[in-house]
Image: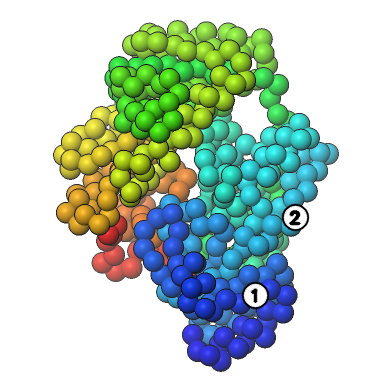
Amino acid sequence: MTSAHIEEIMSIVKTGRVLTDESDRFSYSFDGSFGTYLPDAVIQTKSVEELAALVKFANRERIPVYPRGQSTCLSGGPLPVKGGMVFDLSVMNDLLEISEEDLVAIVSPGVLTADIHKAAEKKGLLYPPDPNSSHVSTIGGNMAENSGGPRGLKYGVTKDYVIGLELITPEGDIIKTGGRTVKNVTGYDLTKLIVGSEGTLGIITKAVLRLLPKPPASETVMAVFDSLIDAGSAISKILSAGILPAKMELMDQASIVAVENYEPLGLPVDAAAIILLELDGHPAALKDEVKQAADLCKSVGARDIRIPQNVAEKAEVWKARKLVSPAIVRIKPTKISEDATVPRSKIPQMCARLQQIRDKYNVHLVVFGHAGDGNLHPNIICDKSDKEEMQRVEQAVAEIFTAAVELGGTLSGEHGIGTMKAPFMEMELGAIGLDMMKRIKEVWDPNNIMNPGKIFPEPGQKLELS
């Protein structure tokens, strides 16, 4: 970008800030994944009109535009890999309205997901998507990456709750998709196309989210296993018995030990795995479901079943799951967090493949995640300053993706593709499937200014973690 470009940007942005100092730009050069890329300018404005004018200017001058929330992304989604402008949408956090009559929330993209949860719960309602980063991630970022979370098993992911959008197109026009009605089949579903497009098709400036009545009661069950594969079998057994938990989380021995070392909670460190269940619904029905789930776990080898008896005990159990991520980085400083997802019936086989990959490449692999919907989070703990180790890690990650696809699964359940998984897209979609996506991108964004360098691999692009 030239100094004339910077001057024009400053003339457009009348109500916000344009950051061009190197120290400010460095603050926007990374996210929760790998790689550092310096933007030419960072724009903070709450004005949709100013953002639209900036996009028109960027489209005319062929300047890359990178929408960004809080940058908790684990796949490289907001990284400004080709320089240009970063739009800091976390400043657009003023709008959060709950309509009890319509059962919707109307939000601006910079609102924290946890604040939507709190606002809905005050009215006795529920916004189900609950990524573990919800206390720091923005709803705009959640929509870009189509985030999920533990409740995805029963309630689905972000795209299942977004029914309307206000959007700036890559050519700088402001359009609306969907609306406030739950039923809407007018033409193509552009709302669903945008959610999960990782900022490559436009910039979300407002959203209408569907809410649900909050279930009257919930119960928690912890099942302890001496075999990770048995734990996987228990998951399949419970789901095929007609029980649909709100959450069904898996922690392997490495994650149990890490959490206990980080903050002792009385977890069984000698266990190979634990499954955490949350069942919600009517209190009378829950009693029966808890007993049934416990019996099914025992039938496939659970050595112990624990049922917390009060709110504090339940909170303690779920705290253990939330602590896995901070706990494991104490072991080594670098964490590669993946979310390869397989059909539920293949969870035992995926668990077996992950153990083989761990041993083959001699990596510190920790397995946890939303096991009920097959969305495992194999995390590799390493040290990126150790080049030899990182080469083994890159091979292990590639093999994890291959295993997921071979078992009928997908590269990503909720973290998105970004830069990290782009080299593997053709493996899952096939050349024609990938080309169809590229064609959509080319029609929406003919000058390729909107978050370029994401989803679609560059020729010869390989996974690089060092």
Q: Nearer the viewer, residue 263 or 252?
A: 263
Residue matched to label 2: 95
Which of the two discs, 1 and 2, labels the residue nearer the N terminus? 1
Q: Is residue 341 left or right of residue 363?
A: right
Amino acid type of the residue that numbered disc 1 sits on in the rendered structure: Arg
Residue 6 visible to the viewer: yes
- Number of disc labels: 2
Q: Nearer the viewer, residue 286 or 309?
A: 309
Which residue appears at 47% of the width and 77% of the height?
22
Residue matched to label 1: 17
User: Pointer 1: residues within 10 angstroms few (<14), some, or many (20+)?
Assistant: few
Q: Secondary structure at mark 2?
A: loop
355 above or below 271? below
Q: Nearer the viewer, residue 288 or 251?
A: 251
User: Pointer 2: residues within 10 angstroms few (<14), some, or many (20+)?
Assistant: some
Amino acid type of the residue that numbered disc 2 sits on in the rendered structure: Leu
Which residue appears at 62% of the width and 36% of the height?
128
